[in-house]
Amino acid sequence: MKTNEPLPLALVEILFVEDNPRDAEMTMRALRKCHLADRLLWVKDGAEALAFLQGRNALPGGQSEARPKLVLLDLKLPKVNGQEVLQRMKQDPRTSQIPVVVLTSSREERDIVRMYETGVNSYIVKPVNFERFTEAISQLGMYWVTLNQPSATLEEGPSR
């Protein structure tokens, strides 16, 4: 997201993991159209996503973890691929309940099956047509960020 000041990590509602700048810009433009991009953090690889989710980026006020309402995840990422990010998220009690939507160009049935077996909440193949893509992202964002009711555990964080 192009802003003068970085978004405080505690305010991130959507963690967007995408290495392709063109696809990232198209997705962020679609989210801006429905006013969902102001609390989005874009990271460019799986290692950055895991660092954010596991609290390796210190948050203001001593908060060590961020819990976005949604993770938009590409499959083919540098450093740590999307399946590994999803697998680690679902194994970690701090992040296991965060909804994850895969946004990818892969229509491979084995990828789809593997991601659902790993715990993805939704699998979306990126449409080539910008209007269709914008509509799909708008609906996706509105559902997961504004309509979906997360469990109290997700909003409060796990008890330790």
Image (cartoon, grey):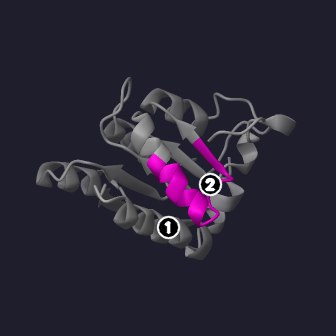
**Residue at image point 46% right, 43% down:** 24
Q: Quadrant of the N terminus?
A: top right
Residue position marked by numbered label 1 in the rendering: 138
Residue stretch in magenta: 26-41
Classify residue 8 as left or right of residue 26. right
Q: Is residue 101 left or right of residue 152?
A: left
Name the side, left or right, on which 153 lies relative to 25. Answer: right
Secondary structure category for the residue under label 1: helix
Towards the viewer: 42 or 4: 4
Q: Residue at x 47, y 27 (%)?
A: 47
Label 2 secondary element: loop
Q: Residues within 10 Å of mark 1 (few under 14, many from 20)?
A: many
Q: Nearer the viewer, residue 95 or 9?
A: 9
> For this view, does 133 lie left or right of residue 93?
left
Residue 95, how many percent across, how many down? 54, 48
Question: Which one is in front, 19 or 47?
Answer: 19
Instruction: Specify which label sits upstream in the sequence, 2 or 1.
Output: 2
Residue 156 in view, yes or no: yes
Q: Amino acid at mark 1?
A: Ser
Amino acid carrying label 2: it is Ala
Q: Position of residue 109 (x, y in %)?
A: 13, 55
User: Is 106 rendered above or below residue 145?
Assistant: above
Q: Is residue 92 visible?
A: no
Residue beneath disc 2? 37
Residue 152: give x, y in percent of width and height.
Answer: 66, 67
Name the residue: 39% across, 44% down.
Answer: 86
